[in-house]
Image (cartoon, rainbow, N blue to C red):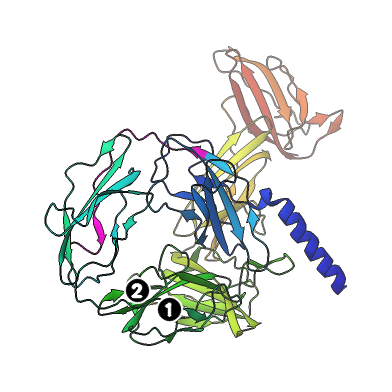
């Protein structure tokens, strides 16, 4: 059996890789084939359940990487160019799905076309050193912000305003930085001009920037994160980060993020002169990116690399080593809205199975407060609440909880009041529409035991009297009313008594006093719409209450008449015995 499971898992993985087109995400923006796309556009795609992270590559041919090599985006289903995409170019995008226990899946390429830029670029700003900065390390390089449509930059550096004695109008392609030749002189003011340009011309009116160097103190070198090591997997959720000490460093700045492009966990935090730190609990089944930068009085170490590690598999969803999608979070189907009776029981119950249940109030201003545990909860009043259910899981890093939650709003509910009922007669059938008022959320039925329905209208009913029921969905009350269609019309008797006494023995249309008879057709039906007889409205005989020679029982019967203007008149009458 164990061998069979492993073979099955390998087959699942094999077919998953072969049929990866079915698992790959659909592009969100830009769409395949889209043209005139802005060169600063963010590329985004749908999230895929169970995927640990994504990688993106861009090229001018399907599967090409000449624009962007395979680059991780972490858990983010999007990528924004550092500066801009090439203009007037067909760009092919390939998204790759990254799993902790499986090879990555390379999705099929798709393409879009960027806009044709027709204007010169805008000016840029000095990013490092900052304009006016002092005590700048003599080993510093020059960095600037992106000018989105620029294809290259011209850099000049001098020791006087407008001067270029250090660097004279040097062209920099495809980079946002420049490393001056040799170290700068200590305690010297430098002036920098950066002019973006493209095929349409240069930026005009750009400002000159300046900074002043400090003493000739060497910058520290970069360190190495050795725990967790670069690329390590199955890392505990609360690890110690440890790195090598760097001679001459006064401290270390640490950044941690869920993608290479942001520091959403820790952003350039100055941890002082230490070489290890504990961190807040990480999420399971995630890749984290770490950069540690030593610094001293001369400044920060330059171009320190980024490393990454992946945490243990936890709640999920994630794919295990056999290619099975695992999700340890309990299923939760609790409603988002709940009504409670103003003067009755306000207890609700979570029906989904779980190891534990917690109920919280969610005040509009202030912190949540836990109000109860267990599957049942007595709601104290209207407002917003949160239900959290969890399963206890034993993993490699110890026991932990896998949770699901639902925020729900509670409002007061009350019993219904039936305001009126409207009855419409069809060909042997009727429709009933019920109008009810009250605070509750109501449903409707023709029997107290149901079935109940959302709609307040019942159609195609056999012609009869009905008792309708309206109830509050939250159990706050029920109302009922007898509906008796009174559809008789002038000239049509409400009853007849075929007992042979010579009085009302037949049922027939009674012409008006003028003697004129406007009715040309007259049909009689039973309560189920079955045609019993067609009688001549101009005769004196009428209907004697029989069908195929057999007397019919006392009951209500229905007629359908057509007048000379083709108007249809419908109603009912009683046969009494």
Which of the pair 96/45 is nearer the observer?
A: 96
Q: Determine which of the numbered discs, if any, sits on residue 164 in the image.
A: none
Question: In the rendered image, which residue does mark 2 sit on?
Answer: 301
In this rendering, the answer to whether 214 lies above or below 19 is below
Secondary structure state at the residue bearing disc 2: loop
In this picture, residue 35 sits left or right of residue 234 = left
In this rendering, the answer to whether 562 lies above or below 142 is above
Secondary structure state at the residue bearing disc 1: loop
Q: From which residue to which does the magenta span run? A: 112-133
Toward which corner of the image does residue 330 lie, by quadrant?
A: bottom right
Q: Earlier in the sequence, mark 1 or mark 2?
A: 1
Residue at horizontal 60 percent and vertical 18 percent from the top: 511
Residue 347, visible in the rendered structure: no
Q: Residues within 10 Å of mark 2 (few under 14, many from 20)?
A: many
Which of the pair 199/258 is nearer the observer?
A: 199
Which of the pair 483/77 is nearer the observer?
A: 77
| Quadrant holding the N terminus | bottom right
Q: Residues within 10 Å of mark 1 (few under 14, many from 20)?
A: many
Q: How many marks?
A: 2
In this rendering, the answer to whether 182 lies above or below 361 is above
Question: In the rendered image, which residue does mark 1 sit on?
Answer: 223
CA separation, marks 1 and 2?
9 Å
Residue at horizontal 63 percent and vertical 37 percent from the top: 430
Residue at horizontal 42 percent and vertical 53 percent from the top: 80
Q: Position of residue 478 (x, y in %)?
A: 55, 61
In this picture, residue 75 sits left or right of residue 215 = right
Q: Position of residue 532 (x, y in %)?
A: 78, 28
Was residue 452 drawn as part of the magenta stretch in this picture? no
Which of the pair 390/105 is nearer the observer?
A: 105
Was residue 126 drawn as part of the magenta stretch in this picture? yes
């Amino acid at each position: 059996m164990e061998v069979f499971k492993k073979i099955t898992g390998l087959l699942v993985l094999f077919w998953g890789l072969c049929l990866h087109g079915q698992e790959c995400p659909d592009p969100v923006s830009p769409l395949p084939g889209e043209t005139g796309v802005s060169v600063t556009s963010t590329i985004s795609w749908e999230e895929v359940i169970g995927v640990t992270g994504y990688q993106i590559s861009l090229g001018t041919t399907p599967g090409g990487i000449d624009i962007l090599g395979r680059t991780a985006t972490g858990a983010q289903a999007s990528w924004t160019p550092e500066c801009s995409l090439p203009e007037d170019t067909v760009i092919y995008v390939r998204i790759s799905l990254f799993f902790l226990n499986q090879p990555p899946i390379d999705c099929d390429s798709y393409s879009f076309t960027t806009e044709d830029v027709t204007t010169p670029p805008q000016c840029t700003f000095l990013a490092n050193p900052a304009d006016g900065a002092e005590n700048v390390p003599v080993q510093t390089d020059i960095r600037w912000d992106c000018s989105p449509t620029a294809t290259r930059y011209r850099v000049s550096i001098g020791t006087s305003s407008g001067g270029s004695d250090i660097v004279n109008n040097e062209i920099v392609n495809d980079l946002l930085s420049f490393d001056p030749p040799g170290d700068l002189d200590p305690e010297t003011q430098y002036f920098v001009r950066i002019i973006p340009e493209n095929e349409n011309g240069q930026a005009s009116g750009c400002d000159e920037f300046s900074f002043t160097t400090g003493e000739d103190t060497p910058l520290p070198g970069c360190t190495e994160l050795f725990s967790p090591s670069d690329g390590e997997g199955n890392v505990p959720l609360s690890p110690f980060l440890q790195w090598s000490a760097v001679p001459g460093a006064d401290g270390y700045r640490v950044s941690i993020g869920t993608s290479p492009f942001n520091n959403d966990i820790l952003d350039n935090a100055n941890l002082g002169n230490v070489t290890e730190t504990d961190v807040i609990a990480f999420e399971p089944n995630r890749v984290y990116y770490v950069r540690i930068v030593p610094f001293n009085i001369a400044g920060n170490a330059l171009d320190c690399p980024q490393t990454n590690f992946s945490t243990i598999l936890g709640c999920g969803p994630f794919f295990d080593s056999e290619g099975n999608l695992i999700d340890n979070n309990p299923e939760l189907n609790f409603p988002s809205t709940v009504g409670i009776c103003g003067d009755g029981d306000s207890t609700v119950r979570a029906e989904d199975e779980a190891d534990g249940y917690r109920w919280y109030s969610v005040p509009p201003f202030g912190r949540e407060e836990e109000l109860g545990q267990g599957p049942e909860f007595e709601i104290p009043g209207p407002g917003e609440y949160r239900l959290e259910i969890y399963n206890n899981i034993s993993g490699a890093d110890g026991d932990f909880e896998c949770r699901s939650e639902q925020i729900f709003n509670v409002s007061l509910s009350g019993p219904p009041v039936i305001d009126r009922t409207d009855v419409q007669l069809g060909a042997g059938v009727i429709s009933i529409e019920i109008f009810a008022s009250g605070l509750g959320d109501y449903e409707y039925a023709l029997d107290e035991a149901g079935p109940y329905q959302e709609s307040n209208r019942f159609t195609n009913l056999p012609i009869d009297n009905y008792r309708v029921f309206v109830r509050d969905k939250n159990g706050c009350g029920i109302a009922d009313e007898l509906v008796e269609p009174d559809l008789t019309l002038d000239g049509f008797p409400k009853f007849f008594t075929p007992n042979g006494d010579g009085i009302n023995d037949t049922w027939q249309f009674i012409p008006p006093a003028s003697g004129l008879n406007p009715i040309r057709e007259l049909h009689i039906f039973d309560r189920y719409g079955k045609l019993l007889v067609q009688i001549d409205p101009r005769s004196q005989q009428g209907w004697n209450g029989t069908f195929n020679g057999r007397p019919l029982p006392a009951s209500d019967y229905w007629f359908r008449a057509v007048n000379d203007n083709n108007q249809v008149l419908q109603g009912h009458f009683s046969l009494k015995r």
